[in-house]
Image (cartoon, rainbow, N blue to C red):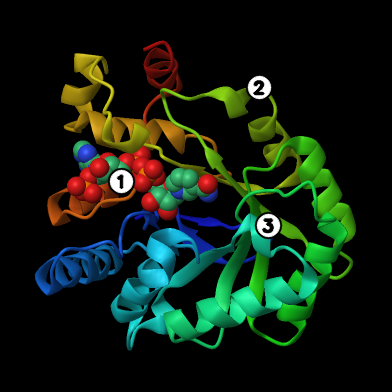
Amino acid sequence: MEYRRLGRTHEKVSTIGMGTWKIGSYRSAEEREGQVKALRRGVELGINLIDTAEMYAHGKSEEVVADAAESIRKDVFIASKVSPENLHHDDVVKACRGSLARLRTSYLDLYQVHWPNPKIPIKETMAAMESLVEEGAVRFIGVSNFSIAQMKEASEALSKNELVSNQVEYSLSNRRVEADVLPHCAKERISLIAYSPLVRGDIVSSIPKAILQKYKMSPAQVMLNWVTRAEHVFAIPKAASISHLEENASSVSVRFEEPEYDEVSRV
Ligand SMILES: NC(=O)c1ccc[n+]([C@@H]2O[C@H](COP(=O)([O-])OP(=O)(O)OC[C@H]3O[C@@H](n4cnc5c(N)ncnc54)[C@H](OP(=O)(O)O)[C@@H]3O)[C@@H](O)[C@H]2O)c1
């Protein structure tokens, strides 16, 4: 596994993380156990970043993550998110307490604002985030789905901490962030956490054969390798199946040549 520094911190986080949207929705105890096992397998393979949210499966995603992190809490980097309707000061604190309880942990490694809410001043939200850092409930502060202007406002609202990440949609099929957010994050040394990096399972079918053969990779692996080609990018594919997870964990074991990345970019 490849590890990268998160933002300007010295924290080493795996380039490939594990997304957990829809994890926590299950029809049987066996299915739930399978989700826990898949996350555990990911950690065995060197993945330490697990992304969840209070919103996912109405909190049940965090409960599954808690089971996966049981007795290995220090080996995992848990990132959760506060929902956009909970961005007033006291609501952020309350939401964090809820996430901590469901995750059965005393701290979140990264706490992200899930979506901006223009009706609630970001200054108020960031003050609450800083109070959580102060009391040790949160280690690092991030955002998600923020524009450059919103990121700047969030950064300016922080007095004692830095904004370490912005989680946004980024994949071979959705490259909107390349126009602005991606270069801005590189310049400010803010990590970009790419969500839906596998286009929600709609794997791109036209990856050049020569690259697939040369690196003995699947199209999904090429997509993950490509999306994390810039040093400040992490990707958080969701995989409930162990075979997908194993594929994803080995997707960045080698890096392509620059012209090959360009070739994939043209797909
Ligand atoms: N911040 C936000 O607003 C936001 C929004 C959306 C998502 N997210 C985060 O980003 C994570 C990932 O995004 P996502 O769940 O939307 O989509 P995704 O990761 O792009 O795609 C997930 C789908 O790809 C399949 N898959 C995984 N590995 C594969 C492989 N190696 N080969 C073929 N198929 C594979 C999965 O199947 P199996 O599950 O069957 O293995 C699943 O159906 C989420 O879980 C969540 O944590 C954040």
Cα distance between the residues tagged 2 and 3 = 20 Å
Q: Amino acid at mark 2?
A: Ala
Residue 262 position in % (x across, y down): 44, 16
7 to the left or right of 162: left
Tell me, yes or no, whether the two marked residues, 2 and 3, touch with CB atoms within 8 Å: no
Q: Is residue 264 left or right of residue 183?
A: left
Q: Is mark 3 within 8 Å of ligand 1?
A: no
SS at mark 3 in the image: strand
Q: Residue at x 36, y 29 (%)?
A: 256
Q: Under tag 2, what secondary structure?
A: helix
C-alpha separation, residue under disc 1 versus residue under disc 3? 25 Å
Give the residue at x 87% y 60%: 123
**Which residue is denoted by mark 3 in the rendering?**
164
Q: Position of residue 138 (x, y in %)?
A: 64, 77
The residue that label 1 is drawn on is 253
Q: In the picture, residue 218 is in which quadrant?
A: top left
Q: What's the residue at 85%, 55% (across, down)?
A: 121
The local crowd at label 3, few if under 14, some if 14 to 19, many if 20 or more residues have their Cα within 10 Å, is many
| Residue 179, disc | 2
Density class for disc 2 (Cα within 10 Å; few <14, some 14-19, many ≥20) is: few
Q: Position of residue 152 (x, y in %)?
A: 83, 45
User: Given the image, on which type of amino acid does mark 1 rest?
Assistant: Ser
| Depth order, front residue of 26/223 | 26
